Image (cartoon, helix red, strand yellow):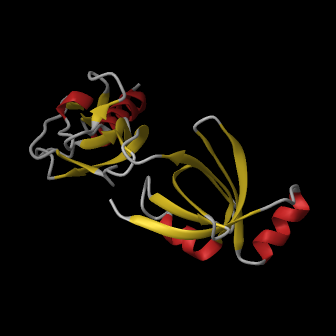
Amino acid sequence: MSEVKLAAETRTEFGKGAARRIRRDSKVPGVLYGHGSDPLHLTLPGHELLLALRTPNVLISLDIDGKTNELAIPKSVQRDPIKGFLEHVDLLLVKRGEKVTVEIPVHAEGELAAGGNLLEHVLNALPVEAEATHIPEALTVSVEGLEAGASVLAKDIKLPSGVTLAVDEDAVVLQVLQAQAEEAVEGEAAEGEEAAEA
């Protein structure tokens, strides 16, 4: 996993007005917390942070005021619901070698068995425990040839070395559903014919 370096500044102004001023300067207010330390309020570069957050569970190397370097992963990101710009970010302080619990996106590949079946993502992301500097970006699962009624459990997903499940191993991640749209339409048509005959 790649590390993204960001220059951050500590901030002493709080509240909505201060946050608006920070965002007007194309920056994002944030908080760094963890390891029992006091939360550290930061101002982060908006565009660089936006690019970094495109990678799930990105590892961010923070250069704070040019004095200290800290490693962090994003824990909570708030975006404007309409315009989509970043409003605030919570970062979790991590150390090299430390295990953290994160959610890894699950991607399905392959074609389901013929018959118009549907694939349902019960879990879009799988909770796992991994070393902070070796968090996988995504997990890929083959659904090739799966029939209706089949499911993929957490324990069925191959995890990279050093990564362990942080969820019940029998938790359903993906399941194949039988397509019912056509049957429902045919059933309604038959009911309509019966009503017309009566």
Q: Is residue 182 toward the left or the right of residue 35 in the image?
A: left
- The residue lying toward the viewer, choosing from 146 and 8, is 8
**x, y percent for residue 142:** 15, 46
- The residue lying toward the viewer, choosing from 22 and 124, is 22
**x, y percent for residue 139:** 26, 48
Asked where in the image residue 175 lies, by quadrant, the reply is top left
The N terminus - image quarter: bottom left
**x, y percent for residue 75:** 56, 46
- Can residue 124 be seen here? no
- The residue lying toward the viewer, choosing from 17 and 142, is 17
Q: Residue at x 49, y 69 (%)?
A: 5
Q: Residue at x 22, y 31 (%)?
A: 151
In this rendering, the answer to whether 2 lies above or below 178 is: below
The C terminus - image quarter: top left
In this rendering, the answer to whether 33 lies above or below 25 is: above
Asked where in the image residue 47 lies, by quadrant, the reply is bottom right
In this rendering, the answer to whether 86 lies above or below 96 is: below
**x, y percent for residue 130:** 34, 40
The tally of labels here is 0
- The residue lying toward the viewer, choosing from 173 and 150, is 173
Q: Residue at x 32, y 32 (%)?
A: 187
- Can residue 70 be seen here? yes
Q: Is residue 56 toward the left or the right of residue 62 in the image?
A: left
